[in-house]
Amino acid sequence: MTGIPLTHILFLSTALFFIGAYGLFTRRNMITMLMSVELMLNSVNINFVAFNKYLYPDKLGGIFFSIFIITIAAAEAAVAIAIIINLYRSHHSIDVEDASEMKY
């Protein structure tokens, strides 16, 4: 079987996951944190598709899990953006540190 080795795909997925984790823990902007979570979810999707291709090439279990995660991520992004827009409208900031100091 020719193609990209599994180790290269797993290295890419691990790198994307840790870049997302770094962005989630070091950024204060809520939009950047949301993008970091999406990056982490996409690295999990890469893992599902890679393991599906290499372990069970004739089945579609990993693909279905990836499609499910993509739909959950889309719903999560829609809800998170709505919350961020509402927070910006009421407090004129999307900084996490400013949000923790706000009194409702």
Image (spheres, rainbow, N blue to C red):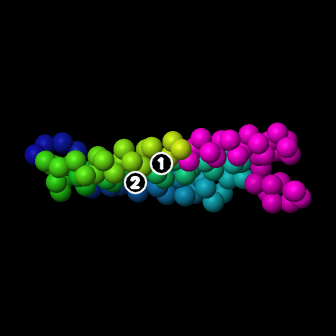
Give the residue drawn at x 70%, y 46%.
83
The span picked out in magenta is 76-104
Instruction: Mark yes or no: residue 90 visible.
Output: yes
Question: Is residue 10 part of the magenta span, yes or no?
Answer: no
Checking the image for residue 44, the label placed there is 2
Location of residue 76 in the rendering, given as x and y in whole percent from the top left corner:
56, 47
The amino acid type found where label 2 is placed reads Val
Residue identifier under label 1: 72
Instruction: Mark yes or no: residue 9 visible.
Output: no
Give the residue drawn at x 18%, y 42%.
3
The amino acid type found where label 1 is placed reads Ile
Looking at the image, the residue that sits furthest to the left is 1
Location of residue 21 in the rendering, given as x and y in whole percent from the top left corner:
55, 58
Classify mark 2: residues with Cα within 10 Å, few (<14), some (14-19) or many (20+). many
Q: Indicate left or right for 76 with 28 as reference.
A: left
Classify mark 1: residues with Cα within 10 Å, few (<14), some (14-19) or many (20+). few
Main secondary structure of the magenta stretch: helix
Give the residue drawn at x 49%, y 57%.
18
Q: CA distance from mark 1 to mark 2?
A: 13 Å
**Split into 4 quadrants, where in the image is the C terminus?**
bottom right
Location of residue 25 in the rendering, given as x and y in whole percent from the top left corner:
63, 60
Mark 1 or 2: the one toward you: 1
Location of residue 22 in the rendering, given as x and y in whole percent from the top left corner:
57, 57
